[in-house]
Image (cartoon, grey):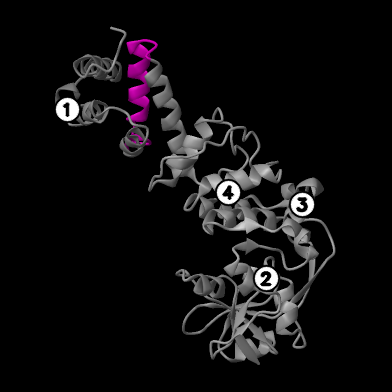
Amino acid sequence: MKIYKVGGAVRDKILGRKSSDNDYVVVGSSPNEMKELGYKQIGKDFPVFLHPSTNEEYALARSERKVSLGHKGFDVSFNKDITLFEDLKRRDLTINAIAEDDKGNLIDPYNGVKDIREKTIKCVSNAFSEDPLRAIRVARFMAQLDGFTIHHTTEKELLKIAKSNELKSLPKERVWDETMKSLKCNFLKFLETIKIYKLDVPWFSRLEYIPKEIQPSSQLENIWCNISKQNDYKFGENLLQKKSFFSYMEVWKQLDVFNENLNIEKQIKTLSLINSPKYKKLVRSVALYRGMPASFSEMIDKFNNYDFSRLKKLDSKKIIQEKNNIWHDLLLKYNLSTKK
């Protein structure tokens, strides 16, 4: 039984980057032996174990054979005879197919170190296209790894995946996970890669326009909504997962309505909606990101600090009317309406 550190942790160490977690491959062992040593099995499709002390992931060395369509269409073998080289060969990219032993020695049968130094994203073999998720992962690595380019052999594999129509078989959650990681890096590079290699259907459909630059934000929702707005709010409709993204999107759309200045009644209706409990905590973030005038946030704060105790005895209709009157006066006071 031998244990090697593999994947992203090894790659990031070579790049001089911090890695969030470590992954290990175990050669020459079995599920029963791992359990006897105190490891906790968590993998269903193939044995992955958590270390009893560190809680880090340890996977048995395995080989794969494509047997059907989709991300999970593989026959997986994980017997004791699977070698480290066989395990590394099934991985997606050469830069991720490097192992490190317990003495710090690198095992690099597919020249991943060379590709890291040359900043090249290259598939390990033509089996790359058997797993459609790998195409999305390449786009994510383009977002994460500054200055890297895609090797021509891998470009062919990406186009093969796009043409196969297997991207639609991917679980939405897996695509969203790769997208979230990309949002934290160079998201425009991620989208450019998706578009160039025709990987947009079905998850990134209606991506017609990618700006040359985009304002950064600590709120990933704002970056997403910015791209979406520039694509008529139709970009990525099939993909969105987190509720917060839907909430931010609604605030963005309502601020569009507000900025149209159609009439003051419409503005008041919009303000009442985005200042409701569901959205009011998001408004300041969106307004600041979009460059709304400071007076807009001041007006919102003024309304929220208003003493509404005098309205308690009124019926609900009267309360709404009185609040609308306050909004009306504030819009005029802060000069935020062109329609009186």
User: For the stretch drawn in magenta, what is the main secondary structure?
Assistant: helix
Query: What residue sits right under mark 1 in the picture?
Result: 306
Q: Is residue 319 rendered to the left or right of residue 148?
A: left
Q: What residue type is labelled 3?
A: Ile
Residue drawn 21% across the image and 19% down it: 334
Q: In the displayed structure, would residue 110 be above or below residue 66?
A: below
- Residue interval drawn in magenta: 261-280
The amino acid beneath tag 1 is: Tyr
Quadrant in which the N terminus appears: bottom right
3D distance between C-alphas at marks 3 and 2: 26 Å
Residue 143 lies, in percent from the top left, at 54, 53
Quarter holding residue 30: bottom right
Towards the viewer: 276 or 48: 48
Which element type, helix, strand or loop, lies under badge 2? Answer: loop
Query: What residue is at 25 percent from the left and 29 percent from the top?
Result: 300
Q: Establish if 53 lies above or below 338.
A: below
Residue 123 in view (yes/no) = yes
